[in-house]
Image (cartoon, grey):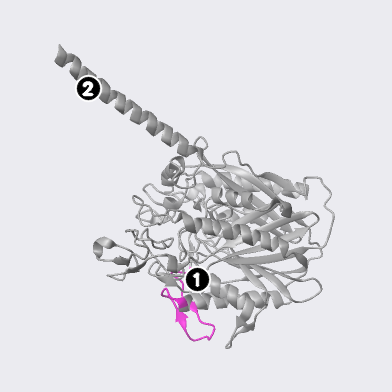
Amino acid sequence: MFSFFGRHKILASVLGSILVAVVLAVAFVGYRTIGPYRSYRADMMKPAPKEAAQGSALEVGVARRDITPFMENYDTWVDADGNGRFEPEKGDTYTDKNGNGTFDLVWMAGFSNNRAAKGVHDQLWARALAVRSNGVTVVMVSLDSIGVFHEKFIKVRKMIDPSLGIDQVVFSCLHNHEAPDTMGIWSYSPFRPRFDHKYMEFVEGACKEVVEEAVKNLKPADTILAQVTAGPDGYVDDSRKPVVYDNAVRCARFVKKGTDDTICTMVEWGNHTETLGGGNSLLTSDFAGYWRDAVENGVPEPNGVKGLGGMCIYFQGLVGGLMTQLHTTVPSRNGKDTFREASFEKAQALGENLAILTVNALRGDKAWRPSDNRVGVAAQTVFIPASGLMGTGMMLGLVHPGWYWGKGKTEIDVVRIGDLEILAIPGELYPEIAEGGVESPDGADYPGPPIEAPPLRSMMNGKLNMMFGLANDEIGYIIPKTQWDTKAPYAYGFSKPQYGEENSVGPNVAPVIHREALALLRRFHDGA
């Protein structure tokens, strides 16, 4: 009898423990799905629809902050086999500077999880451009980072001094694969993550400071706009079918009112910032740094140009598809040398070639000065259907925290500065969604007529229309649904899937982003 009841007590105790564990697990997952800033919504337009927009002089201000990690605060390491990855099991060693018994390294973003920096080649920056006219103030920030999730940018917005009267801050990342991990995806190991929260806080603080300083630096300005074609040959390669390029460099130069003194040159173009490849262990802003420096300071002979002065800000464009220079042969401006393999020489050549195009376009006879410099802005929170690994990560609060009944929260923005219109998209948009050319190839997973039509840029109203990628968020590749292809038989006769889907939130994201972007553009234009 005792044995019988004793066994049942043990069984009851075990079942009770299991039940408690299940309840705790469910509670933990439920807690992680909430995510920060759950009630935050962006739903604004200024000037409001049908509200008279009084013309006034344009004011422009800029600022920058160095966001390069202080390498002296991190451990150093020795790469035994020279592959650029920190692998202690293969003989890699580190110097424990602070004596805490663990490796405190700067984990670089992209290519592999355990890629650690050994030093700094050139500085990384947060750069901000503030514009104000007709009672509207907007600040646009570009970061030399791989990407930042939406909740971090919401945090920064809430940190900014409200007395400055800023209506909206639009953030964008260059998707720099030679910078620290700011997403928590590449920090040593998915099972033993070592994400650098202190560095992320440093970047957030720099964003706050650069926004506030840019607004405090506002001064009367004139605008010069231009557009020029860059390649694709010698500049960028579309590494996934269908081949669709957006190879226009769109340029805006803001000068002090009534002068030719540059305050800021803003450029937008779509290409992955990854010229140095996965074997590089030095932090760098890649070709973007060379481009900006050359626009500001000029390019020496042969075939050089005089710099424009001021500050140059590069906003990443459309990089889905995959837009890359990794497989591109880039010519030197000397007309003799070419660079195909990953190297700083290749990054410099690409950046300087882009700078020469930029400066000549803005000084050319096709550049123009708009007479209308009114500023307007609209923003809309959007909920995207999330699936796959990233969807699971969202649900568990591991990446892009915040789960809204099977959806993730993100944002789309529109900015107008006179003749210039900007559409800010929260990820890596495939160019065909913006430019046209979405296909429905045989073998793809979702046959039928293309969904993402008309092309987004065709619905924009500016004389010059920019599109910022990785804006206010990073939701990965935004792939046309009819081109989604993970199941055999594969499209275009391939024996395996093309690269892309593994870094996307799912096949239903592109239709939602396209639909919501069109809706916001129409609302904005109706109210303009």
Mark 2: give few (<14), some (14-19) or many (20+) Cα within 10 Å.
Answer: few
The residue positioned farthest toward the bottom in the image shown: 302
Q: Nearer the viewer, residue 474 or 37?
A: 37
- The stretch in magenta equals 325-344
Q: Is residue 433 left or right of residue 161?
A: left
Which element type, helix, strand or loop, lies under badge 2? helix
Is residue 526 part of the magenta span, yes or no? no
Residue 215, percent from left and from top? 71, 61
Asked if residue 117 shows in the view, the reply is yes
Q: Please state the horizontal and vertical placement of residue 461, each as a whole percent of the image.
A: 72, 56
Q: Which residue is mark 2?
A: 10
Given residues 193 and 464, the one toward you in this image is 193
Q: Quadrant of the rendered structure where residue 134 is?
A: bottom right
- From the image, tell me which residue sits under label 1: 286
Q: Give the side of residue 283 with respect to residue 229, left or right.
A: left
Instruction: Identify the residue at image location x=40%, y=48%.
Output: 486
